[in-house]
């Protein structure tokens, strides 16, 4: 009985762990982590030639596909023309 309680305790503790930052970085196939400096800048000031062809700049109201592509960089722009977030997909 004690071994069952110990096993349950270990399972519960394992579920509470936070994700490893190295694992999160290894899932950054599109390079979004290195482009976080764009957040808050004007979308019009982004050098498009420095971005991969798999990048899309998404303005409000822009129609986009919902398919997930891990190597595609998404740059989301808000109503004021500033970059609000950058992620893969």
Image (cartoon, rainbow, N blue to C red):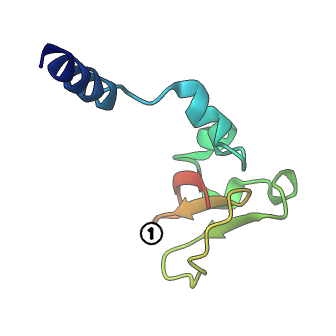
**Residue closer to the observer: 3 or 21:** 3
Q: Which quadrant, please, contains the N terminus? A: top left
- Residue occupying image coordinates x 21% and y 26%: 8
- Residue occupying image coordinates x 15% and y 21%: 5
- Residue occupying image coordinates x 51% and y 52%: 85
Whether residue 46 is situated above or below residue 64 in the rendered picture: above
Most extreme residue toward the front is: 1
- The number of discs equals 1
**Residue closer to the observer: 33 or 1:** 1
Q: Which quadrant, please, contains the C terminus? A: bottom right
Question: Horizontally, is 61 left or right of 10 in the view?
Answer: right
**Residue closer to the observer: 39 or 89:** 89
- Residue 13 sits in quarter: top left
Whether residue 69 is situated above or below residue 14 in the rendered picture: below
Residue, disc 1:
79
- Residue 23 sits in quarter: top right
Whether residue 19 is situated above or below residue 9 in the rendered picture: below
Query: SS at mark 1?
Result: loop
- Residue occupying image coordinates x 63% and y 38%: 33
Residue 49: image location, x then y, percent = 87, 57
Residue 18: image location, x then y, percent = 38, 27
> Alpha-carbon neighbours of circle 1 within 10 Å: few (<14), some, or many (≥20)?
few
Most extreme residue toward the left is: 1
């Amino acid at each position: 009985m004690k071994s069952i309680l110990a096993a349950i305790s270990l399972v519960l503790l394992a579920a509470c762990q936070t994700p490893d930052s190295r694992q999160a970085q290894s899932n950054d196939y599109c390079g979004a982590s290195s482009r976080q400096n764009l957040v808050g800048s004007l979308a019009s000031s982004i050098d498009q030639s420095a971005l991969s062809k798999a990048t899309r700049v998404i303005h409000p109201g822009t129609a986009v596909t919902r398919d997930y592509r891990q190597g595609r960089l998404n740059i989301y722009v808000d109503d004021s023309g500033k970059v609000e977030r950058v992620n893969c997909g």
